[in-house]
Amino acid sequence: MVWDVCSWSDMGPLIRLETTLTGDRYLRVLPDHLHSFIPIEHSDGLGQFQQDNATPHASRVATKWLQEHSSDFRHYHWPPKSPEMNIIEDIRDALLHAVENRSPPPRTPMDLWTALQDSWCELPPRYLQTLVESMPYRVAALLCVRGGPTRY
């Protein structure tokens, strides 16, 4: 399992998680990786953090940490059972596609990790920008169908 962070202009770290993510383990990722990435990318204090409602993301400890750091960046709260609107899903699909098309394909966990890291670093900045810029259209499409399925 991996955890990642990105912005309109840059890719943050791709973090390898050796085990299942829990709220407590997520609390070790946020200060080290998110909290160090946001101020660099958004020194103006206008950084915005979006995540889905995975159980570790919505845990009490993670929610408390995000509230305690609300002056450092804004956190979008997604209602439970809401449609997936996170661009990270598109990025993960792109990574999966890139890894599947590698020749030779990864054969060991270490090969897979290396392929993921390489593919992560090879994502073009314009790809990120296109995804971020698509958010208003995604939200508008979601509103048009009143929360139903969209092409996103």
Image: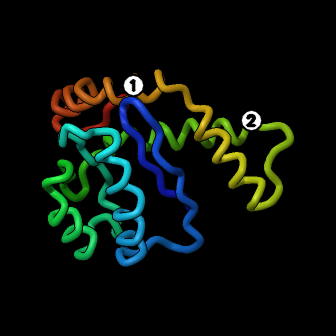
Q: Residue placed at 56% from the left, 36% from the top?
A: 94
- Colouring convention used in this rendered image of the protein: rainbow
Give above or below for 86 relative to 59.
above
Q: Which callout, 2 or 1, points at the residue further toward the start of the chain?
A: 2
- From the viewer's perspective, tell me whether residue 35 is left or right of residue 127: left
| 92 or 14: nearer the viewer | 14
Q: Do residues under tags 2 and 1 come within 8 Å of each other at their CB atoms?
A: no
Per the model, the C-alpha gap separating discs 2 and 1 is 24 Å
Residue type at mark 1 is Gln
| 86 or 10: nearer the viewer | 10
Residue type at mark 2 is Asn
Q: Residue placed at 54% from the left, 26% from the top?
A: 124
Give above or below for 87 relative to 50.
above
Give above or below for 26 relative to 33.
below
Looking at the picture, how far across and down is residue 71, in whole percent?
Answer: 13, 54
Looking at the picture, how far across and down is residue 57, in whole percent?
Answer: 32, 64
Query: In the rendered image, which quarter is residue 46 located in?
Result: top left
Mark 1 packing: few (<14 Cα in 10 Å), some, or many (20+)?
some
| 106 or 49: nearer the viewer | 49
Q: Residue placed at 40% from the left, 71% from the top?
A: 28
Q: In the image, which disc is placed on residue 104?
A: none
| 123 or 45: nearer the viewer | 45
Q: Residue placed at 26% from the left, 24% from the top?
A: 137
Q: Which residue bears the numbered disc 2?
A: 101
Secondary-structure class at tag 1:
helix
Q: Which residue bears the numbered disc 1?
A: 129
State the quadrant of the C terminus.
Answer: top left
Secondary-structure class at tag 2:
loop
Looking at the picture, how far across and down is residue 119, in whole percent?
Answer: 64, 39
Looking at the picture, how far across and down is residue 53, in whole percent?
Answer: 30, 59
